[in-house]
Amino acid sequence: MWSRCGILDSLVYRPRFAKSPGAHRAQAGENHEVNQNHDPSASRTYAYEVDPAFPELPEGGVLGEVSGVAVDHEDRVYVANRSTNPVQIYSTDGQFLSSWSYSDFERVHGVTIAPDGRIYIADDRRHLIRVFNPAGELVLTIGTDGVPSDTGVEDRNPRTIKHAGPPFNLPTDTAPTADGSFYVSDGYGNARVHHFSHEGELLQSWGEPGTGPGEFNLPHGVTIDNKGRVLVADRENGRIQVFSADGTYETEFNDLIRPCGMCVDGDGVIYVAELAQSYGRITILSPKGELLEQWAIAGDVPKVGAHSIALDSEKNLYVGLVYQGAPLPENARPVIKYRRV
């Protein structure tokens, strides 16, 4: 199984689609009990507990904000973070396994692992997508280093984009497919999704700035579901848009709060990391977009946000956190493991 869908020692349970954190605070290790899901075609329920031991940093190790998290075929957890050690690899029980010697990133923004084992990393500030083999060796670079495409954007503010442009202007995420091609959400300075061949040839692009079907206000995350549909986290429009593989608009799932990252399990269930406002939120949706479960992440640090999410083979969740301009606390562990119980 392959999928992709970060640390405070507490979580807050929230009623479904409530707009502010709930009153009950579950301590690390406490079961996160859930209600029966809303999808009449499914019989599963969703319950998680925080694993307080994840991750175990090596001596002297540091994790910055975790912009991306992914799990490979061997259940190794890749943590892409904004530190001098930007790609760190852990076992599912939290043991530090290794890190990459390659560190030539300005700002990592998402990590994805393809069915063939290749690892895709967006570097938004350098307008690049880099592709690595499982040994961490660079095999492909797409984009012009440090040169954004022309979209009329001002000060990296997606609300100021005048028109869509070619790749890339602050790209955000990648979604490899089973046939070796991959999609890129492009992103803070553009309003497009691009489809590339395995070798990096541009096949297709779609999207314009706006709020209508097929239009984007910060396409922040992209993933492929179990039917081959392309799901795009349209962050500032508060929705996930669903497209066919050729970019044809199919539907959208609304009532989200700044969705950033997604992953999809083998049954088509969608797990969403939401930046929200002053707290992060996790939302679980059926393949039809029906709400199955939802909870908020909160703590003593203001403006913590859920930025990325991944699943391992046991359907445990890993969530990467960013702090939205707040300083990273000295003892922060900005990646959460939620054990499925």
Image: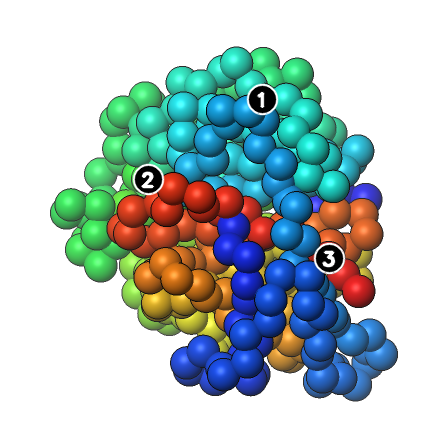
Q: Quadrant of the N terminus?
A: top right
Q: CA distance from mark 3 to mark 2?
A: 33 Å
Near-viewer residue (145 or 293): 293
* Left or right: residue 163 compared with residue 331: left
**Up-down relation of residue 36 to residue 302 (above or below):** below
Q: Which mark is residue 339?
A: 3
Q: CA distance from mark 3 to mark 1?
A: 24 Å
Q: Residue beneath label 1, please?
A: 99
Question: Can you give x and y, in whole percent of width and height, for residue 163 in the image?
Answer: 24, 51
The earlier-in-sequence mark between 3 and 1 is 1
The earlier-in-sequence mark between 2 and 1 is 1
- Give the amino acid at mark 1: Ser
Question: Can you give x and y, in whole percent of width and height, for residue 87 in the image?
Answer: 53, 28
Q: Quadrant of the C terminus?
A: bottom right
Look at 68% across and 39% down and name the residue there. 94
* Left or right: residue 310 compared with residue 188: right
Q: Residue beneath label 2, please?
A: 170
Q: Residues within 10 Å of mark 1 (few under 14, many from 20)?
A: some
Q: Quadrant of residue 48?
A: bottom right
